[in-house]
Every structure is written in structure tokens, then in C-alpha cells.
Image: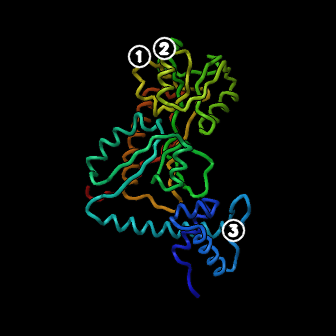
Amino acid sequence: MAGVALRQIRAIIAVCEEGSFTRAAARENATQSGISQHVAAVERLLGVKLFERSAAGVRATPAGQHYYKHCVEAIGQLENANEEVRGFADRVTGDLRIGLMPTMTRAALAPTLEQFVPRYPDVRLHIVEGYSGLLTDMVLADELDFAVVPTFEGRVGLKSRLIVRDREMLVSSPRRGFAPLTPVRLKDWGPLKIIVPGRPNVRRRNIEIYLQTHGVEVADMMEMDAMFGTLDFVARSDWVAILSGLICVKDIESTERVINPIFDPPLFAEFVVISPSRRTLSTPARLFLDAFETQITRIQDVWASIIPPAVFPEISERRPIRRLRAAKG
């Protein structure tokens, strides 16, 4: 009996992840009829229906979901083999497409590039700054090798791992009267006029839940998905924002903004690196992530040296930095 061809496996994966023959065809640079024929051929070969077709789209049957998982694993093993063989090369080369949020670019990106670029000059970098929804869609569309976004429930076609669990900070103008770097209990300082991310941003939900659960009085709320606009407006007004310590570290000695750790209870933001389920991170991607995570750890260490541990205890388990033996760069 003939086996399932690789192009048919890729068609199954694309249809399952896209939920549409049309979008799957666009992703695979194929025709819709071609994708349909690949799926139909596999269904005939296996003797089982893999997808339910309806006016609302295409959804994998239980058998289709099970088969999809094995297809992704098979493609992943092939990608792993390719990357392992590339590791025998004398130089690290190739295109690397990265998506980062402003939270990550303000303090961690430049020092990462300062180390990475001279060491791996043959890697062609393409870095996109954006918010989580855009970056997630770009990863799914294969426009990015990976992106770093707030943790979320997950989507078909993506795999993720935790990259950092970061402390959230209150950011305000000196006119608000907070003592710099002193831990603050938000419920003692209401009513607050607070800037929050848009609703598609996972952090928006986490912040609202925290405010409601812990009795923080809010006088007004402004939605703004413009990180540097937020920082500038806070410095010029009596509005405040809750931002990740990763982006706030550059304001530790600022005279324009005051940074205060939130405590009793503390508030954390978790960030994950996401990539397509069917792909293995390339050697350049893994090397870049190693350098990037080193900078994130450095920032976490800065905050750990400033925040009183009795009030704001250290995160009990810090994920160790992965080390990858690099090819000669």
C-alpha cells in the first residue's frame, strides 16, 4: 500500500491549523482544489474522515486531531534532523525573523544585538515590533520564526514555553508623590486614573482582574496600545500605568517618571516565546534566544537587588538559561 506523501502531510497540517481550505492553500502556495485533493487522498488511504466541512469552515474530527498531532511531530523530527546537520557547518548563517513587544525592545534588545551581531555576522536579522495579537498572527502565517508575547491560552498551530515571569510596576509622574522604588499597595492610593492596554492584550484582563479583586478604586481608565506614548503621557500628567519591570528598568534613575513595585499582593506578568508547532527553531533562533534570555535575567537581577525581599520576595524558581553549543561564528 502506498504511503502518505510529505506534501499531503503538510496539507493536513495547514487545513487543521487554518480551519479553511482557502487559507491552507494560500499558506502552502497551492490551489484550493489541490489541497482538497491531498486531504481526500489521505482520507481514502486511511479509510477515515479527518475533517468536517460546513458553511462555517473546516474542523478536524477526533481522528483528524489525533492524526494532526502525529503529523506535527513527524515534521518536527524532520526539522530537527535538518537543524542538527546544519550545526556541523563552520558558520551560522540564514535569515532570522523575530517579533518582539515594546516591553522587550526597550531594555533587552539593544544589548542582545550588541553581542549577537558581531558574533554571527552572516545571520540576516529582521525584527518586528508589535503587540501580541499581530505578532501571534504573523507567527501562524510563517512570517516570523518566533515571537515573545504575554502568556495566553494557546492556539492550534503554535507551541510555546515560558521565557520570564516578570514583576509589574506602577509608573507615575513625580507630581503623584510616590517615593521612587518604594513598594506600593494600590488600594491605598485610589482613586487612580490609569492607562491600560487594549482588550485583545492579555495583560489588560490580568490588570482589570487585579484591580477588581483587590479593591483598587479607579477614577478613570484610558485604553492605549502605544507604549512610548504611554510613558510620555504619564510623565506629563497625573495618570498612571502598570507596566512590566522589563520596560521600567531604564527609568530607575529617571527624573521624569517614578517606578514603584506593586505589592500586597504583587502582580506578575508572564511572557512566552511562541513558534509554529510544525517547525523547529533554527540554530540562529536558538542562539539569539540564549543571548536575549541572558539580558532578561540581567534585568531581573537588577530588580532583585533593589526591591526589599521581605516585602517583595524573590520568585522561588528561576528557570535556568539554556546553553547551546554554537558553531564557529
Q: CA distance from mark 1 to mark 3?
A: 59 Å
Whether residue 244 is situated above or below residue 71 in the rendered picture: above
Tag of residue 255: 1
Tag of residue 51: 3
Q: Amino acid at mark 2?
A: Pro
| Residue lying at 56% horizontally and 21% vertically, measured from the top left | 240
Q: Nearer the viewer, mark 1 or mark 3?
A: 3
Q: Are marks 1 and 2 in contact (CB under 8 Å)?
A: yes
| Residue toward you, 224 or 317 | 224
x%, y% of residue 199? 63, 36
Which residue is tagged 2? 174
Whether residue 295 is situated above or below residue 21 in the rendered picture: above
How packed is label 2: few (under 14 Cα within 10 Å), some, or many (20 or more)?
many
Which quadrant, please, contains the C terminus? bottom left
| Residue toward you, 112 or 323 | 112
| Residue lying at 62% horizontally and 31% vertically, measured from the top left | 207
Does residue 70 appear anywhere in the picture? no
